[in-house]
Image (tube, coloured by chain):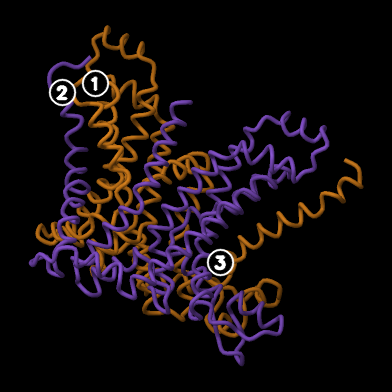
Amino acid sequence: MSVFRKAKRLPLHVVVIALALIWLAPSLGLLVSSFRPRQDLLSSGWWTAVITPSQWSRFTTANYRDVLTQQGMGRAFLNSFLITVPTTLITLTIAALAAYALAWMEFRGRQLLLMTVIGLIVIPLQMTLIPVLRMFNSLRLSGTFPGIWLAHAGYGLPLIIYLLRNFFGALPRELFESAFIDGATPFRAFVKLVLPLSVPVLASAAIFQFLWVWNDLLVALVYLGGFEEVAPLTLKLSLLVGSRGQDWHLLTAAAFVSMIVPMVVFFSLQRYFVRGILAGAIKG
Amino acid sequence: MNKGRTHWFYLAPALLLLGVFLVYPSAETIRLSFYGPRSETFVGVQNYVRAFTSRPMLIAFRNNLLWLGVFTLFTVGMGLVLAVLLDRVRYEAVIKSVIFLPMAISYVAAGVIWRFVYAFRPAVAPQIGLLNAIVVGLGGQPVGWLIQRPWVNNIALIVVGVWVWTGFCMVIISAAYKGIPKEMQEAARIDGANEWQVFRHVTIPFLKSTLAVVTTTMIVFVLKVFDIVYMMTNGAYDTDVIANRMYNEMFQFNNYGMASAIAVILFLAIVPFLLINVRRFRAQEAVR
């Protein structure tokens, strides 16, 4: 490329890089601030710590130690896993079984059932909160892990059944015919054929459900609110904002703790992640 | 391949959960919306009348409309601009990751990130919030971004939403943009069209259906927007939105009738847009 053409493209590069920096700056501010001592954080902006090499030796992990041990974010981190992992496994197992029946079993009312499941995608969470909360209160499921596992599974099912059914339905028919000629039962065909062939869509659906639940605030707030010992990271962080709203050294570290797992998932599984997010956008 | 009733073995767990957590509660919420705060007395449409006339709800409706216009315009607009510009640089993937990253984190974390950006201190103290540091650096007075009503604080909240969702719009639009046959654009250029004309008369018509899908998705998000507002202002200083009103009627005022009516209104507002999206999604699946 000639120098002239390069110069002509300069505004393009400037605009693109400026936009990227604008997008990055808020998160960068959070990350840098989470490593600064309280008094530094309150006496100068985080950008001064970046551009002043003499301040670099003052960076500390004390804020993280504090939020993880004193402020309960360590416990909340564990709770987030205890909520998210079982929920994802329960949702995917139940959805895969149902999607298999809806894709490959002949029975009356199958089409109607499928349309009903798809129709349920449009129901916003808000439509269900009050009756489910009342039910949970009378069954003593409020503030328990099994309660929130089942609630999240119920909310995630319509979309995930739909995604899996589309994929299962597109598998070639001959595959099943030859399996059944060899004497396989439907369940054996499901475990030995359908699941191994569906790893990509299962991965996307799992990542979608995992992140949805990990990042959820509303469901945790309603069904686990008031029970701090089972609060996940999002709920704990929102409580910290309420009680320690000006203690930025704690809030920045706590927020970053809540972001670590989603960011690891994002960078390591980007392809499935994007697919999962795109599919999830139609969830009500 | 299956005889008898074995299919129910596969379907039963899903149907049970769907019934318990979606079908029954939705029907019950519709019923409760016609009852009083404690669900004991039938009040007819009184909750709905109040929902459409009380000042806090009218402010919430106004704010959701503001979100609808500004948020949708900026997410879809920026997504389109980024998709077109990034196609022309070699480091496209890196920039895309940066813009898409906020989609991965929770709104609670995004709320903390932006509360820090908007941090406000009196003019005598050093500004630790990025935005006020810039304002003061340019010789201005620090601004209470989340306090100053009615436009500054609402726009400040919408900016957080735009920061999160632009990456989503960009990724979807970009995928469609790369599907446009390059010969089409080249042919237009050879015929003497400038870049703007190519964009306006070749690119946009090709992207129409994609832009429609993205726009309806943004509208559905806007109608349900909750976490950002709950985290940053909890509706104070006239920043409330419908979903946060519902939550507060439920937990702050224990008015289950009113909260249910708001939920039903939210549901009715969302349904048309989600139906459009689900239908488009099915059409796409059919093509594949």
Outermost top residue: A181
The local secondary structure at tag 2 comes to helix
Task: Provide the residue designation for mark 3.
Answer: A31
Residue B250, position as x, y percentages in the image: 23, 68
Residue found at x 83% / y 37%: B192
| Badge 1: chain ID | A
The local secondary structure at tag 1 comes to loop
Chain B tint as drawn: purple
B10 relative to B70, above or below? above
| Badge 3: chain ID | A
Quarter holding residue A219 = bottom left
Residue found at x 23% / y 22%: A187
Q: Quadrant of the N terminus of chain B?
A: top left
Residue B225, position as x, y percentages in the image: 40, 60
Residue found at x 20% / y 58%: A144
- Front residue of A26/A267: it is A26
- Front residue of B216/B232: it is B216
Given contact means CB atoms under 8 Å apart, are the residues at marks 1 and 3 in contact? no
What amino acid is at disc 1?
Met
A206 relative to B231, above or below? above
> Residue A105 shows which numbered tag?
1
Q: Residues within 10 Å of mark 1 (few under 14, many from 20)?
A: some
Given contact means CB atoms under 8 Å apart, are the residues at marks 2 and 3 in contact? no
Given contact means CB atoms under 8 Å apart, are the residues at marks 1 and 2 in contact? yes
What amino acid is at disc 3?
Leu
Is B179 displayed left or right of B217 in the figure?
right
Q: Residues within 10 Å of mark 3 (few under 14, many from 20)?
A: some
Which chain did the renderer colour orange?
A
The local secondary structure at tag 3 comes to helix
